[in-house]
Image (tube, helix red, strand yellow):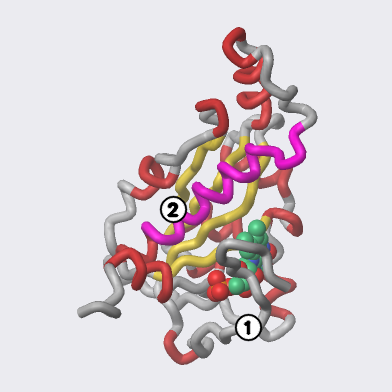
């Protein structure tokens, strides 16, 4: 049928950030392929500065929830999210890998990587984040994303042995959605974001 959506279109259309997971000891889907497929992304200059750590150890997930200030979130009346995750994937940015790569011989005429108007390490990290969320949704679990802006970064780095110079984009979470807390489908906003042929206001 002409208007039938493809598998990928459905995966993208149905994905939304899920922020409430149930605590369940039931077996959950195998997530072992997710990390390496997440970082199967193009990286600027093939710098390969995006890395990932997956955490499925329950005790470490509890600690990450503390370092992500989940308590503040619960105090505001929100449901458990980070601490009930089955897995947390940390998207890591090695900015130096980009500077190193662009200093190399074949890149000597390129714009210096310290002057880029759009720092490509964030672009590549976003691509990895999207891969990760879609791969999680494909397993039947629900994905979420918590940015690192309100986290205890030194404690997270210490727990997971992440080197000082590596930046953490945030947590991509995987869990079983609490259906009693299910949020209604995405609203369609009127804001014009898609343009064709020319930019239209
Ligand atoms: C870079 C980035 C940072 C985000 N940080 C947070 C966050 O710290 N906490 C949170 O609850 N959601 C966070 N989100 C999720 C957004 O709020 C989410 O994209 C928005 O609510 C739309 O959700 P949808 O994907 O379900 O349509 C973040 C998303 C992005 C892309």
Please provide percent x and percent y for residue 153. Answer: 72, 47
Can residue 148 be seen by looking at this rendering? yes
Query: Which residue position is annotated with label 2?
Result: 131
Describe the element under mark 1 as helix, strand or loop. Answer: loop
Please provide percent x and percent y for residue 120. Answer: 64, 38
Where ligand 1 lies, by quadrant?
A: bottom right
Residue plotted at (57% across, 55% down): 171
Q: Is residue 39 above or below residue 61?
A: above
Of residues 54 and 100, the one drawn nearer to the viewer in this rendering: 100
* Quarter location, residue 1: bottom left
| Numbered circles on residues, count | 2
Would you say 129 lies left or right of 98 here?
left
Can residue 66 be seen by looking at this rendering? no
Please provide percent x and percent y for residue 95. Answer: 67, 31
Query: Which residue position is annotated with label 1?
Result: 189
Q: Residue furthest left?
A: 1
Q: Which residues are magenta?
A: 116-135
Residue plotted at (60% across, 67% down): 195
Q: Residue furthest right?
A: 115
Q: Is residue 8 above or below residue 176?
A: above
């Amino acid at each position: 049928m002409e208007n039938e959506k493809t598998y990928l279109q459905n995966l993208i259309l149905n994905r939304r950030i899920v922020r409430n997971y149930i605590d369940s000891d039931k077996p959950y889907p195998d997530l072992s392929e997710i990390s390496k497929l997440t970082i199967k992304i193009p990286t600027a200059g093939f710098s390969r500065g995006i890395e990932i750590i997956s955490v499925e150890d329950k005790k470490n997930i509890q600690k990450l929830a503390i370092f992500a200030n989940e308590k503040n979130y619960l105090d505001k009346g929100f449901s458990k999210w980070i601490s009930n995750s089955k897995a947390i994937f940390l998207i890591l940015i090695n900015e130096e890998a980009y500077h190193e790569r662009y200093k190399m011989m074949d890149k000597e005429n390129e714009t210096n990587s310290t002057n880029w108007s759009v720092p490509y390490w964030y672009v590549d990290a976003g691509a990895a984040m999207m891969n990760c969320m879609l791969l999680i949704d494909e397993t039947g679990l629900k994905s979420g994303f918590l940015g690192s802006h309100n986290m205890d970064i030194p404690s997270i780095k210490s727990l997971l042995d992440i080197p000082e110079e590596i930046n953490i984009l945030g947590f991509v979470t995987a869990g079983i959605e609490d259906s009693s807390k299910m949020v209604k489908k995405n609203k369609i906003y009127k804001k014009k974001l898609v343009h064709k042929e020319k930019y239209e206001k």
